[in-house]
């Protein structure tokens, strides 16, 4: 057997030590990646509070919580949406602390804020700028929706009740497109006032928040919003109830029920939709009126819900 020289022995020892070092580093990286993935996954799912959490609070604390949540609704409309516009105006938007319609052009039929552009991304930018400059001190949550969306504002407030608007929240129904995760505007986009503040600061920085879409591919308005917010260190988060069910629905309630009947007919009401759902989309004006009846007007005589919180409507409104 050939005897190894000192140089050969040193080389082999170095090779073995290097291999062991690589294995250890790889294991540590996998552990860190696993930890980061778990942290990332948990960070991307924002849940509504459990009823037990809220019921444990003293009455003065509950009253203060219910008063502290102030929601400003931004409804993005175009002239072709006139029938949906009318339906939203007459139904759920009355339950916002304040609701404004942002139109692509000056409209004589309904009061709106004219943005003088038909491009949805530019409309969104101008609407957020307007909201921040005029209402950053009056409201702490900003809910942007399209006119085919029906929203239950009280459920939105309940979802937000334990969230601090001074923190960066960007919540709704999330979609992943490549490496970008964004909130689908069809289900509504919720920004905390802190997120709106950070967004406002980058809206005029073309390197961080370009006004025009890229030349190679076209991004939707809600995707472009996610890009700008990512530069602010803000990432999309999926809104769910305490049972892990979606509360911001980017589909109509008819579609959700139909899909559930096909897949789980025996568990229709348990599996279809959250009891505290915030939004549904692809709603016709007639369906919005039906939803309004079911959510706010229909009552089972003698049955009372033992809700720990009561969200009072804004003063001077003619809501239901």
Image (cartoon, rainbow, N blue to C red):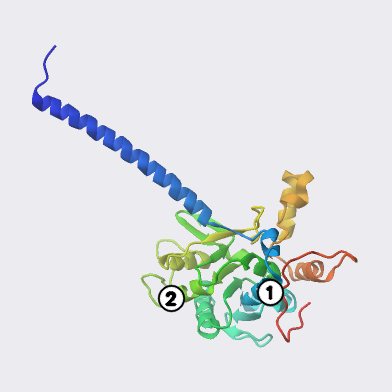
Q: Which structural element holds mark 2? A: loop
Q: Residue at x 20, y 31 (%)?
A: 15
Question: In the image, is 315 to the left or to the right of 106?
Answer: right
Crowd around label 1: few <14 · some 14–19 · many ≥20 (10 Å): few
Residue 13 found in image quarter: top left
User: Is any part of residue 14 visible from this angle?
Assistant: yes
Asked if 288 appears above or below 244 in the picture, the reply is below
Q: Which structural element holds mark 1? A: helix
Seen as rendered, the residue at the extreme right is 301
**Mark 2 and mark 1: span between their CA atoms?**
40 Å
The circle on residue 60 is: 1
The image position of residue 38, as x and y in percent, is 49, 49
Residue 287 found in image quarter: bottom right
Q: Residue at x 42, y 77 (%)?
A: 201
The image position of residue 187, as x and y in percent, is 62, 64
Seen as rendered, the residue at the extreme front is 58
Asked if 78 appears above or below 163 in the picture, the reply is below
Residue 118 found in image quarter: bottom right
The image position of residue 70, as x and y in percent, is 62, 77
Which residue is the site of mark 2?
A: 203
Asked if 19 appears above or below 136 in the picture, the reply is above
The circle on residue 280 is: none
Crowd around label 2: few <14 · some 14–19 · many ≥20 (10 Å): many
């Amino acid at each position: 057997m050939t005897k190894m020289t000192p140089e050969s022995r040193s080389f082999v020892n170095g090779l073995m030590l290097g291999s062991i070092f690589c294995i250890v580093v790889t294991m540590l990286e996998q552990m860190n990646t696993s930890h980061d993935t778990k942290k990332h996954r948990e960070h991307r799912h924002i849940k509504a509070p459990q009823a037990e959490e809220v019921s444990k609070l003293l009455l003065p604390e509950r009253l203060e919580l219910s008063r502290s949540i102030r929601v400003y609704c931004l409804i993005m409309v175009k002239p072709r949406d006139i029938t949906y516009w009318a339906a939203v105006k007459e139904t759920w938007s009355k339950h916002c602390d304040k609701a404004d319609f942002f139109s692509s052009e000056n409209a004589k039929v309904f009061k709106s804020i004219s943005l003088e552009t038909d491009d949805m991304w530019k409309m969104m930018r101008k609407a957020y700028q307007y909201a921040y400059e005029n209402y950053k001190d009056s409201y702490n949550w900003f809910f942007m929706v399209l006119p085919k969306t029906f929203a239950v504002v009280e459920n939105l407030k309940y979802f937000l009740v334990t969230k601090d608007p001074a923190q960066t929240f960007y919540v709704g129904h999330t979609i992943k497109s490549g490496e970008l995760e964004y909130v689908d505007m069809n289900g509504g986009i919720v920004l905390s006032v802190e997120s709106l503040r950070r967004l406002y600061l980058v809206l005029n920085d073309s390197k961080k928040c370009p006004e025009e879409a890229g030349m190679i591919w076209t991004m939707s308005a809600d995707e472009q919003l996610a890009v700008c917010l990512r530069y602010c260190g803000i990432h999309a988060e999926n809104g769910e109830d305490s049972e892990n069910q979606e509360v911001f629905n980017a589909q109509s309630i008819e579609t959700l029920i139909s899909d559930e009947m096909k897949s789980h007919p025996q568990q229709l009401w348990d599996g279809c939709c959250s009891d505290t759902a915030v939004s549904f989309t692809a709603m016709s004006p007639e369906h919005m009126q039906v939803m309004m009846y079911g959510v706010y007007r229909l009552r089972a005589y003698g049955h009372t819900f033992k809700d720990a919180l009561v969200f009072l409507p804004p003063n001077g409104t003619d809501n239901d």
